[in-house]
Amino acid sequence: MSPSIGSLPPKYRVTVDPDRCMLCGRCVENCAYGAFRREGDRILTNSRVCTACHRCVAFCPRDAIDVVERPLDYRSHPVWTRGVREAIYNQARTGKIVLAGMGNALDYPMIFDRLVLDACQVTNPSIDPLREPMELRTYLGKKPQRLELARRGDGEVELLTELSPNLCLETPIMIGHMSYGAISLNAQLALAKGVTAAGTFMGTGEGGLPEPLRPYQDHMIVQVASGRFGVDIDYLERGAAIEIKIGQGAKPGIGGHLPGEKVDEAVSKTRMIPVGSDAISPAPHHDIYSIEDLAQLVRSLKEATEWKKPVFVKIAAVHNVAAIAAGIARSSADAVVVDGFRGGTGAAPRVFRDHVGIPVEAAVAAVDAKLRRQGIRNEVSVIASGGIRESTDVAKIIALGADAVYIGTAALVALGCRVCGNCYRGLCPWGIATQRQDLVDRIDPEAGGLQVSNLIHGWTLELMELMGAAGINSIESLRGNRDRLRGYMIDQALMDVLDVRSVGA
Amino acid sequence: MCGIIGVIDRSREPMDGTAIRRALSMMNERGSGEGAGYVVYGCYPEFRDYFALHVFFDNIHETKPRVDELLHQWGRVVHDEEIPTWDLPRLRKVHTPWRYFFRPDTRLMPRSTTPAEEIVTELVMRINTSVEGALVFSSGRNLGVFKAAGWPEEVADFYRIEEYEGHCWLAHNRYPTNTPGWWGGAHPFNLLDWSVVHNGEITSYGTNRRYIESFGYRCTMFTDTEVVAYLVDLLVRRHDLPEELAVTALAPPFWDEIDAMEDDRRRLHRALRLTYGSAMMNGPFAIVVANQESMVAFTDRSKLRPLVGAEHGDRLYVSSEEAAIRAMDPGITRVFMPRAGEPIVGRVVA
Ligand code: SF4
Ligand code: SF4
């Protein structure tokens, strides 16, 4: 509150219907922000602290709670939106950069929702995945342009080409990097159990690999980011693959900051920094000022791990993403991760989250096209991330040219996350973006793991059905198959970038 | 639907076009009278060292000089003429089919290991994409594609197909869903030594096209079949894969089958799928590919289109229907059905 601006209208209003309430007290217990208190035989609320995380709603046995968004809005105005006005009040008061959570919140058109998929009729039969094989197995890593063979005396052919190590995924859906520190140990454990059950992989984020996750290390991709937190040879060797993080779609061009309050004993250990110190990841890697420096880091990591591990490089989808990806493909890197501007994050400056970078659909289309034009598409796999919400997004981005996807927010939603956007406050009532033990305990890693693997499994089944309907029985034949996409109300310039035709064409 | 048939004589005994004309007509149920075609290997022995370029011209006076000019720039034409045809009441001659016998000047492509082929490929791609009103539809040595819109017997009579002789023939009876009535859309498709006939639809066409175009091929025929010819050319000629392995790359075993193979084979098959994932063809199809030396027939991995093989002495037949083979050669001694993805391969021994 500031003396001259006063308080802003509450974002939500929480009410409890006294006729329904049985005074069980679950809401009081569950709300991490203290929105509820009991006085006599009534539950009273403080709407101002509510984040609409719906923890109370989910656990009230009587459906007595109502959360209304924007009960009192500003006078409506198309230019001076609520967000714009509040950012100004905020900055007038603090003189600082406004932080925001989760992904891009501006109302840009979703390209995914303007692309439609194809199905077979008459001239070719659709395939029923319940009766016929349907292959989603995906290998990530460098692939040779061609094979060298030798014909042996007995007429058999011998393979001379030595393949580089590839990651083998049973489904092209992985979980992206969310670090220990940013999310809780139980959340990470649940994700790890989920990906292990689903035969796929997850990223550790730049938070090291906490001891309890080691049993799942064969399904983990360890990250080397600009802060180098938690990186030593043991860490590198434990991972199934290594990922260098250059940038992140939610905040391209800037670094990260884990506030000291979140650095407790355990986090300090895995990150290898003192308790209570801020963990600051600088914007650039201080040893990477150009593409050849990156190529060198890729090689160093490969050398350190005896060329046994694939190395990925993650970049934010920015205007020049295709050329950057082509540069990365020319290094020894095995995959480039293209992180679109809808990618989630614990906290990012609002202006970056909403205004910097490009959508992953256009980025992947451009990257795939550029790599093909240069004849080096086989040199790297392309992993798409940032704003993948459901199985159709997976199908569409693969048809645009990706090999696999990373999901982030979707996996957290499977653990209960309600996309309330307050991750940076460290009080996540769902036990995800928090280190407070009582909150962390709200996730049962076993049950959470099942939810995560259920989600991946469900999407995988849908993907199979979509492919079957399109008469395709192997994921390779969907990859880059833009003929099976049509654009619906997309302008011509974007259609050219996506290289898809219009519906009806 | 479409009907396909192919025959190769392993001792290079020539056959004229009478029998295959009869056989293809047996499958009229599979066509719609909007496209048919034949390819014959060994038909131009007197010009065996020259690339026989068959071209459809919309207008001889305007477009032919441009093609002539391109050919003269890249090599020498020893002979050219209109392809002899008969006028038929039911077949409308919308193009003038022409043939050139051409020898590329290999000095113009010094760094290539197969300069003549590179030049001819480049010419085919260039004419088909940039010379409006001209379409090269056959470009191999000592072989010729003859195709048009019409029923098989009309197309055969139009081109006087019974007068050609060769040791290997493919033919196709078309039921078009794309580009009906367009002569260029009829099969066989050909590039250099490779010809393809195809029954089915390739659902992976977009993937295959993007893949093959990154190697400099350009798809110009608006149909999924030409991509097969280019893929085979890439895999066999440029990447030097044995034909059986090329077929394996195009229609590979399922991962479950690969996982169950013993070590060496598993390594090989895994490498093939990793390397050539984008070349793999999906969807229902039966395909016959031929060159001077061999004929290979195969289906998709689930065999959603029919394919039957038969033998009689040195002759190997493949077709959508046994009846068609029997119409061609009532004396066949063995009839067999290959399993899904399993190739039937015939090679000349002489
Ligand atoms: S959880 Fe529901 S029933 Fe229980 S006290 Fe809160 S509002 Fe009442
Ligand atoms: S993870 Fe973040 S967005 Fe999700 S519920 Fe927790 S605080 Fe809210």
Image (spheres, coloured by chain):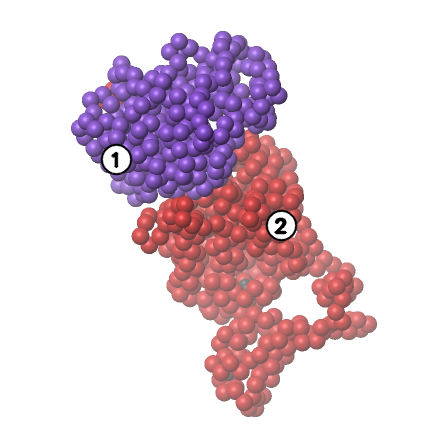
**Residue bearing the label numbered 2:** A490
Residue at x 35% of width, y 52% of height: A129
Residue at x 44% of width, y 21% of height: B85
> Please, which chain is the residue tagged with disc 2 on?
A
Residue at x 62% of width, y 76% of height: A68
x and y percentages locating residue B264 in the rendered image: 28, 32
* Res B9 → quadrant: top left
Both labels 2 and 1 in a single chain:
no
Residue type at tag 1: Ala
Q: Above or below — where is B18 with respect to A89? A: above
**Residue bearing the label numbered 1:** B323
Chain B on-screen colour: purple
Q: Above or below — where is A446 with respect to A300? A: below
x and y percentages locating residue B278 in the rendered image: 44, 37
Q: Nearer the viewer, residue A407 or A445?
A: A407
Label 2: few (<14), some (14–19) or many (≥20) C-alpha neighbours in 10 Å: some
x and y percentages locating residue A275 in the rendered image: 56, 57
Chain A on-screen colour: red
Q: Is mark 2 within 8 Å of ligand 2?
A: no
Can residue B131 be seen? Answer: yes
- Mark 2 or 1, closer to the camera: 1
